[in-house]
Amino acid sequence: MRILVTGTAGFIGSALAERLLARGDEVYGIDNHNDYYDPTLKEARLARFAEHPNYTHLRADLADADAVNRAFGEFRPQRVVNLAAQAGVRYSLKNPQAYVQSNLVGFVNILEACRHGKVEHLVYASSSSVYGANRKMPFAIEDAVDHPVSLYAASKKANELMAHTYSHLYDLPTTGLRFFTVYGPWGRPDMSPMLFADRISRGKPIDVFNYGNHSRDFTYIDDIVEGVIRTLDHIALPDAAYDALQPSPGTSSAPYRVYNIGNDQPVQLLRFIELMEQNLGRTVEKRLLPMQPGDVPDTWADVSALRRDVGYSPNTPIEDGVARFVAWYREYFQRGE
């Protein structure tokens, strides 16, 4: 298939592009290579497949509608995976405008291009952050998500609403995936696994927020990519059982779906740090601090809908995932024991 993927210099996007190319798809990647974190890492991810004969790369911003439309016009994708976004909960408190441009303006440009390009299926990144102040565990797609606690979360909820509008008005099949704490090789430097690895490897204290009482549904990158591909291959259809008198947030009478994509095995943050220390061969001081604004205490994905519909089955234990991540970290940053 011809598949357009946005964010191909990013963590998930680069891993997805590699897998799609390996199975024989033609991939057109778009990424703006911004400096939210070290662009050198983005270039290194891209270098793994940039010379593949079935890969084409465009350095452009999704907020540039002309560039997006040109890419769609030239490549004529059959399916699209939109992973490009301004990420990060904490950064959204400092630079809200970046989230409006990337996550709202950029996303409507993708929706318009999919609509006019007669795309068969749009899969896009949402986030576990949409659950916001919810405390019922595990988080389920049937739960209302009307209480976001960061602009990042609000922008991802907005993406789901925007996608539904296009599914309803233009019969565009769309599927949103709420990612839960993705980790693994080539991960983002602003996320806790990389931050912890850096501090531990240098023997520096770690800041542990909410006094260590966080738990996260850490999900290994290979499991995420498998779920994205299975979803991409399973075009969203109208739900024949949808009841407008008792509407479910995860389905619709339009060709629209929303799924959680996580490990369904929450891990205490202190346990995750312990595994990092074991694999890096040293222990460090933990500075226990209050919870930060915009953060949530716990995440846990109910992935029953994704299991039912596409056979999604995450199978990477946290012990194995952390070991693989640390092995990559040491090799990439040349940090031995």
Image (cartoon, helix red, strand yellow):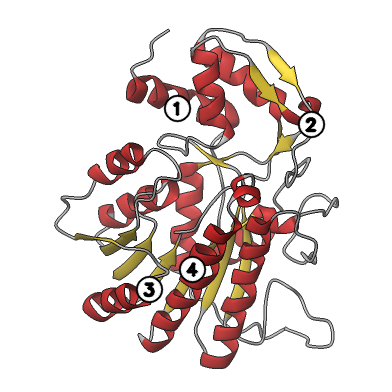
Q: Which amino acid does label 4 sit on?
A: Val
**Number of marks:** 4
Q: Earlier in the sequence, mark 3 or mark 2?
A: 3
Q: What residue type is labelled 1?
A: Arg
Q: Which amino acid does label 2 sit on?
A: Asn
Residue visible at 48% across and 75% down in the picture: 235
Separation of residues labelled 3 and 4 (CA atoms): 8 Å
Q: Name the residue tied to disc 3.
A: 79
Q: Left or right of 323: which side holds 15? A: left
Separation of residues labelled 4 and 1 (CA atoms): 28 Å
Q: Which of marks 4 and 2 is in front?
A: 2
Q: Which amino acid does label 3 sit on?
A: Arg
Q: Earlier in the sequence, mark 4 or mark 1?
A: 4
Q: CB under 8 Å between callouts 3 and 4?
A: yes
Residue visible at 32% across and 57% down in the picture: 20
The percent position of residue 197, horizontal first and vertical second, equals 51, 22
Q: Quadrant of the N terminus?
A: bottom left
Separation of residues labelled 1 and 2 (CA atoms): 27 Å
- Per the image, label 1 sits on a secondary structure element best described as helix
What mark, if any, has residue 93 been given in the picture? none
Q: Earlier in the sequence, mark 3 or mark 4?
A: 3
